[in-house]
Image: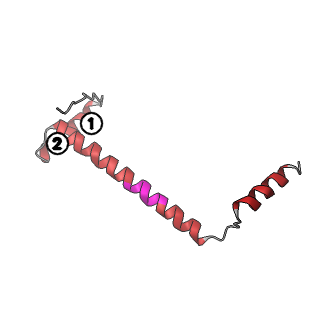
Amino acid sequence: MIMSDRLQILVNEEEAQLFRRCARSSGETLSQWARQAMRLYLERQRARTRTQKLQTLERALRCSYPTADIDPMLAEIEAGRDLR
């Protein structure tokens, strides 16, 4: 059996009327419309997050950052701490 939670959201009257009109125009109840709108928002957020991560990775790969094996890099970091 699937359990449900009630979610109560307070909106002003203008928003409530707009939301009801949107639900009516799509042939849905307000609850159905709201659930669908929230799911769509989540999907867009996830897609944007993936897209942003890929764009960041692509930008980083175009750069020529200095690299080294981990042991020499850690040794340089430790040596730099002794300079203070």
Q: Position of residue 53 (x, y in %)?
A: 48, 58
Q: Which mark is residue 6?
A: none
Please determine whether, in this image, residue 36 is positioned above or below residue 80.
Answer: above
Q: Could you tell me which secondary element the residue under label 1 belongs to?
A: helix
Give the residue at mark 1: 15
Classify the position of the N terminus by image quarter. Answer: top left
Quarter residue 72 falls in? bottom right
Q: Please name the residue shown 42% across and 57% down the image.
A: 50
Q: Please name the residue shown 19% across and 36% down the image.
A: 31
Q: Position of residue 67 (x, y in %)?
A: 69, 66
Can residue 51 be found in the magenta stretch? yes
Question: As rendered, which of 57 and 3 lies closer to the eye?
Answer: 3
Residue occupying the far right of the picture = 83
Q: Please name the residue shown 47% across and 58% down the image.
A: 52
Question: As rendered, which of 10 and 58 lies closer to the eye?
Answer: 58
Question: As rendered, which of 83 and 38 lies closer to the eye?
Answer: 83
Range covered by the magenta-colored residues: 47-53
Q: Position of residue 37 (x, y in %)?
A: 26, 45
Name the magenta segment's main secondary structure.
Answer: helix
Q: CA distance from mark 2 to mark 1?
A: 12 Å
Give the residue at mark 2: 23
Q: Could you tell me which secondary element the residue under label 2 belongs to?
A: helix
